Image: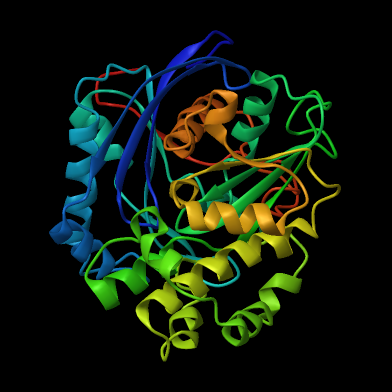
């Protein structure tokens, strides 16, 4: 991967929503994006999802063999048909405690490299955490490249509504993501994960499709106010969350009907974004939304009502909101392979710009 030419990389992402594995191809030199290639998705079965849900919060050690097999097999399957120069393998986040025990993404990149016969970059977050950073979010350097690729000329924000929400504020007038003032990124709060958990507990469903249940309900303002009193929202970014940091949400809606609970939790996720905007250096000209939350019309309506700027899905600027996170790890894999930083003080709070990730190559390759 040495040199400065373009590399065809595949990024793999299995998010905290536990829906499945995204795979997306990016042609990049680790700085500019030359092209977006093919992409695919492999959903987890209900049984696989139950296995992964059962090990959330666990750290490396015994008892993870079955879950590791689920992760490895799904990723090998989704790579079928691709012939990349390099793979960016995020793995499945089980626990994230940057100011405590660290961060844990389940997955064996060295084994994956052997099985698919291509170099793999993995364990993207540990180095950042060990050097004092939050280890998340990691997509902002890619978001900066996307802002350049769509020729943005005023500050914009990318909002990812996955299991946890995160925002990247970008000043595209800067030359590089590493430049002072070019980026600010942090986790906004819970997004889809607690709503998915509610649907699983109450209805035996994996998510609230099209916000259909939330649309039937009423927001319980008392529960919403208690949620917004959490100290996390007042903390100065950069800052990050574990999937289960806001488990209080389920307790706050425990007495509500299914529909009112779904509406209230959706409002909580939108209100967390509204709180986050207060930390941005300036109001972005536009918020571009990626991740599963943009498919929820109730969530999108709440965001548009709450924010003082246009809120649009990233498809409106020609990007793929379902694959943006996977594309990010393709891009970051090339940066790791070429010794370029993947995070910095304004994205994870690490004291200096640092690179993360382990590069594993198949046996017999240079």
- Vertical placement of residue 144 versus 300, above or below: above
Q: Residue at x 38, y 28 (%)?
A: 24
Q: Left of 40 or right of it: where is 339?
A: right
Is residue 13 visible in the rendered structure shown here? yes
- Vertical placement of residue 126 versus 336, above or below: below
Q: Position of residue 124 (x, y in %)?
A: 49, 44
Q: Position of residue 18 (x, y in %)?
A: 32, 56
- Vertical placement of residue 269 versus 249, above or below: above
Out of 133 and 27, give the one closest to the viewer.
27
- Vertical placement of residue 64 versus 156, above or below: below
Image quarter for residue 94? bottom left
Image quarter for residue 157? top right
The chosen color scheme is: rainbow
Q: Residue at x 17, y 43 (%)?
A: 73
The C terminus appears in which quarter of the rendering? Answer: top left
Q: Residue at x 76, y 26 (%)?
A: 176
Q: Left of 257 or right of it: where is 186?
A: right
Q: How many marks?
A: 0
Q: Position of residue 1 (x, y in %)?
A: 47, 17
Out of 178 and 207, give the one closest to the viewer.
207
Q: Position of residue 220 (x, y in %)?
A: 55, 82
Residue furthest front in the image: 216
Out of 4 and 15, give the one closest to the viewer.
15
Image quarter for residue 284? top right
Is residue 135 visible in the rendered structure shown here? no
């Amino acid at each position: 991967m040495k040199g400065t030419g373009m590399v065809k990389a595949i990024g793999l992402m299995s998010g905290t929503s536990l829906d499945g594995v995204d795979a997306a191809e990016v042609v990049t030199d680790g700085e500019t994006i030359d092209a977006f290639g093919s992409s695919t998705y492999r959903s987890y079965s209900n049984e696989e999802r139950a296995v992964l849900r059962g090990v959330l919060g666990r750290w490396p050690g015994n008892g993870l063999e079955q879950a590791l097999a689920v992760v490895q097999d799904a990723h090998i399957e989704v790579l079928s048909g691709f012939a990349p120069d390099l793979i960016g393998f995020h793995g499945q986040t089980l626990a994230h405690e940057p100011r405590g025990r660290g961060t844990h993404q389940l997955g064996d990149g060295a084994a994956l490299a052997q099985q698919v016969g291509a170099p793999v970059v993995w364990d993207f977050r540990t180095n950042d955490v060990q050097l004092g950073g939050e280890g998340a979010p990691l997509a902002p350097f890619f978001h900066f490249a996307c802002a350049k690729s769509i020729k943005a000329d005023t500050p914009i924000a990318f909002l990812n509504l996955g299991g946890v929400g995160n925002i990247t504020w970008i000043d595209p007038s800067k030359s590089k993501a590493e430049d002072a003032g070019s980026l600010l990124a942090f986790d906004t709060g819970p997004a889809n994960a607690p709503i998915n958990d509610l649907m699983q507990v109450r209805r035996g469903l994996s998510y609230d499709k099209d916000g259909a249940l939330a649309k039937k309900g009423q927001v319980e303002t008392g529960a919403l106010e208690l949620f917004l009193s959490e100290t996390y929202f007042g903390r100065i970014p950069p800052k990050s969350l574990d999937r289960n940091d806001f488990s209080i949400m389920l307790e706050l809606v425990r007495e509500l009907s299914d529909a009112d609970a779904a509406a209230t939790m959706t409002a909580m996720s939108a209100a967390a974004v509204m709180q986050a905007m207060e930390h941005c250096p300036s109001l972005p000209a536009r918020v571009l939304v990626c991740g599963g939350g943009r498919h929820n019309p109730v969530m999108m309506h709440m965001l548009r009502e709450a924010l003082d700027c246009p809120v649009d899905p990233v498809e409106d600027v020609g990007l793929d909101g379902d694959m943006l996170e996977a594309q990010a790890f393709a891009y970051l894999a090339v940066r790791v392979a070429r010794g370029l930083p993947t995070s910095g003080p304004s994205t994870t709070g690490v004291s200096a710009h640092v690179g993360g990730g382990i590069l594993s190559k198949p046996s017999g390759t240079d």
